[in-house]
Image (tube, helix red, strand yellow):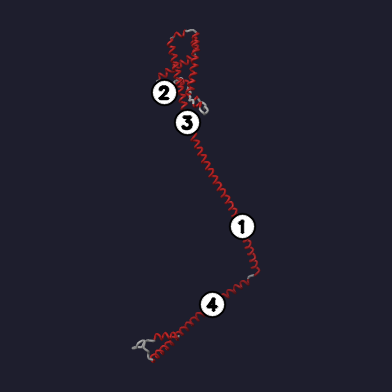
Amino acid sequence: MSDVGEHGREQIDLPCPGGDGGESRPAPYIRLIDTCCASMDTCTVAQQVESVERNIAFLQKEHQVLLTGLRLEIRHLKKRCNDLSCELSKSSPERNREDIVAEEEFLQARLLQTEHNLAEQECSQRELKAKLRHKGAQASALQVRLRDEERRFLEELKRRSHKITALSRDLHKQTDIAAQLTFQLHSARFRLYHQAEEEDDEEEGERDKKGPGCLSSSPQVSTSRAEARHRSHCSARLRRSERVRECVPQERILGPEKPRPMPDPTLFLYPFTQRLLPLHISLGGHCGEGDSQRRMGRLRTRAMREDTGPETTDL
């Protein structure tokens, strides 16, 4: 309050009109100012006291209301507690104990069962983990084995492909060799056939030159002629066989490889009617029809003459 008075005094202390701020004031004037400040201080203090009293009265009322509510709540809770205690006192304690014991036993059994189930689950989980590890090891082993099998299969496939390629090359070479041998055989047969035909033509020319008087010769001449013809046929056969041997390449026989067997000759044989024809005619040559018929007749007469040669000479 002294501070307030001082503050009021500071607010009221004003310079005197007509005088300087640094000059001294007269004493009556100062006294008047002091009395005014004191009266103002008393007025402000009274107002503050009244406001404080009003605030205290309001707080007392609020506190009274709060206490009244708390008392009512306490009474309500006491009444609820009494009701619950009455209910508990009315129920039989033995029955409650039996229920509690039964509930404890039930909970204990359930706890044991749960622990047993948990242990079984853990055991089965461990077994499943072991099986899973075993299956994983088996799967990895099977994968390794599958890779090895695949690698071996690819190697075998590559080896077989190389072998098939080599065999196909050998087969191609053998096919070429067989074709060459077949061509040589056909050419040899063609040459032999022409040589035999030329020899027959020469013999027929000699017979034609001698004339028909040779038929009335003596039996001795006919027998000697038959022997000479037989010797000539044998020598012709020998010459043919030697020529056929000469047609075969010597490197196939004298080479480092063993001589292979001759192919089946039935593939190169022809029926009797085609065998009597020349090779170029039997294979579809371009000879004339009259020439072929003439040669067929000549060959047939020659064959009949060879079969009935000695008997006709005897006649």
Mark 2 surroundings: few (<14), some (14-19) or many (≥20) residues within 10 A = few
Q: What secondary structure is marked by label 4?
A: helix
Q: What secondary structure is marked by label 3?
A: helix
Of the residues shown, which amino acid type is indicated by label 3?
Answer: Lys
x and y percent of residue 98 in the render? 65, 66
x and y percent of residue 265 in the render? 50, 24
Indicate which disc residue 119 carries: 1
Separation of marks 3 and 2 at Cα, in angstroms: 29 Å
Q: Residue at x 61, y 57 (%)?
A: 119
Indicate which disc residue 162 carries: none
Of the residues shown, which amino acid type is indicated by label 1?
Answer: Ala
Q: What secondary structure is marked by label 1?
A: helix
Which numbered mark, 2 or 4, is in the foreground of this view?
2
- Which residue bears the numbered disc 3? 173
Regarding residue 37, the answer to whether it shows in the image is: yes
x and y percent of residue 174 in the render? 48, 30
Of the residues shown, which amino acid type is indicated by label 2?
Answer: Gly
Along the horizontal axis of the image, is 155 left or right of 36?
A: right
Separation of marks 2 and 1 at Cα, in angstroms: 102 Å
Which numbered mark, 3 or 4, is in the foreground of this view?
3
- Which residue bears the numbered disc 2? 285
Q: Which residue is drawn at 49% across and 81% down?
A: 59
Q: Tag 1 or tag 2, which sits nearer the N-term?
A: 1
Separation of marks 2 and 4 at Cα, in angstroms: 143 Å
Regarding residue 263, the answer to whether it shows in the image is: no
- Which residue bears the numbered disc 4? 70
Please state which of residues 231 and 308 is positioned toward the viewer in this rendering. Answer: 231
